[in-house]
Image (cartoon, grey):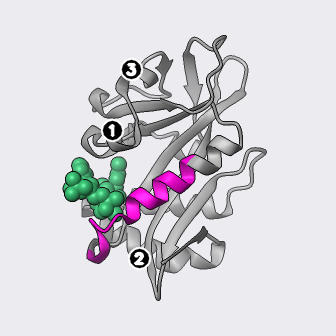
Amino acid sequence: MRLREALESDADELKDMYLRAFDESEAATVAAVALRFLSEESADPVLSLLAEEEQILGHVSFSPVYLSQTHRLIGYLLAPLAVHPDFQKKGIGSQLVKLGLDRVSSLGAGYVFVYGDPKYYERFGFEANKASPFIPPHPLQYPYARQGMILNENKTLKGGSITCSSAFDDPNMW
Ligand SMILES: CC(C)(COP(=O)(O)OP(=O)(O)OC[C@H]1O[C@@H](n2cnc3c(N)ncnc32)[C@H](O)[C@@H]1OP(=O)(O)O)[C@@H](O)C(=O)NCCC(=O)NCCS
């Protein structure tokens, strides 16, 4: 299995993988975010990683997160993440998450946030109390699902409102 950065030319296959991995109720929305990140041009680029053999097996994005008040980059939001249903529970999701965390850590990211099942994300070291000082862009439907991790500590940063990529500027995603 190879892990590499996703390209715009991966879009069709990536979309197909997301539509298979997620429930019908949310698959199209999540796939659209993953695809949008492939072509998004921003000052702080999105990290978009995929796992592949003969086909795409899994994918993850890490998009920039800013402190709203100062527009300073403070870290990344891990989302979306998906593994093709035929290849789940083989460690592929974990490899993608770990590689992404290494990459954004070496970019100097202070925090990584995630909004998903704590039973899955706690294995990487995500904790609810690391996210709680930061106010998300929209009210949360599942507050227990919001977690964070400190990669590079900045003792002067105590918390505040955060701004995510415009791809997540939709209250239904929170
Ligand atoms: C969640 C997902 C990315 C995990 O990928 P994966 O490659 O199967 O995960 P890994 O092989 O690295 O880890 C498997 C472990 O995670 C657990 N796990 C998988 N999905 C889980 C979930 N939603 N909640 C809790 N645990 C989960 C498995 O039970 C397994 O546990 P074990 O190690 O104790 O046996 C994959 O199941 C998936 O794509 N699910 C559908 C889409 C989705 O829910 N994405 C995440 C959105 S937050």
The image shows residue 11 at horizontal and vertical percentages of 55, 74
Instruction: Determine the residue positioned at 75% across, 48% down.
Output: 42
- Give the image quadrant in which the ligand numbered 1 is located: bottom left
Pointer 2 or 1: first along the chain = 2
For the C terminus, the image quarter is top left
- Residue stretch in magenta: 86-101
Instruction: Determine the residue positioned at 25% across, 61% down.
Output: 23
Residue 26 vertical position relative to residue 152 in the rendered view, above or below: below
User: Can see residue 37?
Assistant: yes
The amino acid sitting under disc 1 is Glu
Single out the residue that lies furthest toward the right.
43
- 118 left or right, relative to 150: left
The amino acid sitting under disc 2 is Asp
The answer to whether the residue bearing label 3 lies less than 8 angstroms from the nearest atom of ligand 1 is: no
The image shows residue 49 at horizontal and vertical percentages of 56, 63
Residue at which label 1 appears: 122
Q: Residues within 10 Å of mark 2 (few under 14, many from 20)?
A: some
> SS class of the residue under badge 1?
helix
The image shows residue 88 at horizontal and vertical percentages of 29, 68
Nearer the viewer's eye, disc 2 or disc 3? Answer: 3
Residue at which label 3 appears: 129
Q: Residues within 10 Å of mark 3 (few under 14, many from 20)?
A: few
Instruction: Determine the residue positioned at 55% across, 19% down.
Output: 161
Disc on res. 102: none
Please report contact status of discs 2 and 3: CB closer than 8 Å, yes or no. Answer: no
The image quadrant of residue 65 is top right
Structural distance between the alpha carbons of marks 3 and 1: 12 Å
Pointer 3 or 1: first along the chain = 1
